[in-house]
Amino acid sequence: MTAEKAPAEAAPPEGSKRRLTPKMMIVGASSALLLAGVAGAAVWLWPKPSDPAEAKAARLAARRAATPASAPLALPAPAPANDGAGVGAAPAAVAAAHDGGSVSAPPEPVPQAVPEAQSPRSAHGSTAEASLDRLQRRLGEVLGGKGAIEASRSGELKVVSRAGGLVPVRHGDAAGPGRSGPLADAAQGVVLPGKAGHATRWSYSGLGGPQVWGKLKPEFSQCAIGQRQSPIDIREGIALDLDPVHFDYQPSNFSVIDNGHTVQVNVAQGNSIEVNGKRYALQQFHFHRPSEERVNGRQFEMDAHLVHKDAEGRLAVVAVLLERGAAQPLLQTVWNNLPLEKHEEFPARSQIDLNQLLPADRRYYTYMGSLTTPPCSEGVLWVVMQQPVPMSAQQIDIFSRLYPMNARPIQQAAGRIIKQSN
């Protein structure tokens, strides 16, 4: 991130009361941002023009916009974190709330006000120098370890980001005196809260998208630095005579909730699987569109993730690939019990038998990975059924109205062993 201050105006004739108005420019924006009130000066943020004539015109526009005396700059105080339920780092909590909840970006320190200059204003040069010194010092305090303010040659300040790169200021983020808006530092993945009580939630696109999951909260760090992340493109599996997965699914009561990230089905106790001699109890299952898993580069219409947990809190997820075809009776039962409002659990009066969701061919791929949503916890055993299950175009359309896209991008396999049963 680089910021430049326009060269100071020439000193006015003796006796003139006009005061010097230093400017500062933040490079890398497509919109302008004016902040007024630094010792009678104005700080103007605008995109750096590529043409010298455009640069001169931008400086003139900034001078016209600046007022001789302005009120102290006041930025909104950081909003308190507003964490939602449904996410956590502990495996036990994750199993019950996978794909649910909201997160808040840790608030960044922001200045409350920049004090007025105390020096006499008759000496134009000394007043401007004192104002710039205070501005440089104050900005340095705000940046902390994330950057530094450097004074290069006369009339220029540089704001250097430790992460490198430029800071984009979007049209929707622009703010003028008396207005506020969130400013996203794409180079560092940090989002500043805009209005009190508002915080960035993790999502599948926009400011809370997968590219910043690992920086929204400390417990989400695995989303960025993990080496065994999911989903992956399943290729070059080693064909082996693997023991079949034993599915112990029974007709069960269930409830449906739209948790803000997907449609999740909570199933009564009594359903489990047995893999490699270990038993995992079913916690819930949910859906993604399109499928998060790919097989030899092929992506499917949707997939269902059945999340299980063993007695020691370790997780095993069975993925069922869903393709366009005939109607799927179990899915229709789930859709018939969709709640009318998000985050409101709807108890169904009927039962479901998850054996109806499984393919006739029980061969599978298996590998070690992670949850595909924050906190992206690793150490998850994945079982991906090889044969897709059909669902109708109408059933796909119903889910698409709620979530047209809620799939995490493919992660690097990073040399992991992938087995497939013969």
Image (cartoon, helix red, strand yellow):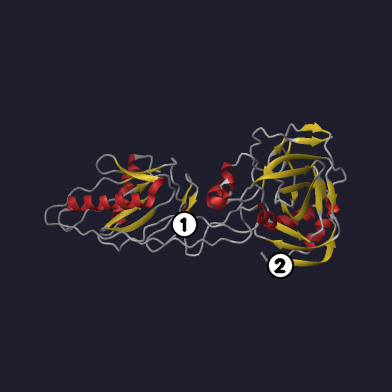
Q: Residue at x 63, y 53 (%)?
A: 90
Q: Which residue is mark 2?
A: 340
Of discs 2 and 1, which sits in the foreground? 1
Q: Left of 8 or right of it: where is 372? A: right
Q: Residues within 10 Å of mark 2 (few under 14, many from 20)?
A: few
| 412 vs 402: above or below | above
Q: Left of 360 or right of it: where is 209? A: left
Q: Amino acid at mark 1?
A: Pro
Q: Left of 413 or right of it: where is 157? A: left
Quadrant of the frame with the N terminus:
top left
Residue 89: x, y in percent? 61, 52
Residues at marks 2 and 1 touching, judged by CB atoms closer than 8 Å: no
Q: Which residue is mark 1?
A: 107
Instruction: Name the element at disc 1.
Output: loop
Q: Residue at x 47, y 53 (%)?
A: 171
Q: Nearer the viewer, residue 340 or 237?
A: 237
Quadrant of the frame with the C terminus:
top right
- Alpha-carbon span between mark 2 and mark 1: 33 Å
Residue 94: x, y in percent? 66, 54
Dot placed on the residue nearer the N-terminal end, 2 or 1: 1
Q: Residue at x 82, y 58 (%)?
A: 270
Q: Is residue 172 visible to the viewer in this orientation of the structure? A: yes
Q: Amino acid at mark 2?
A: Leu
**Furthest-right residue in this view:** 360
Q: Residues within 10 Å of mark 1 (few under 14, many from 20)?
A: some
Q: Is residue 327 visible to the viewer in this orientation of the structure? A: no
Q: Left of 410 or right of it: where is 207? A: left
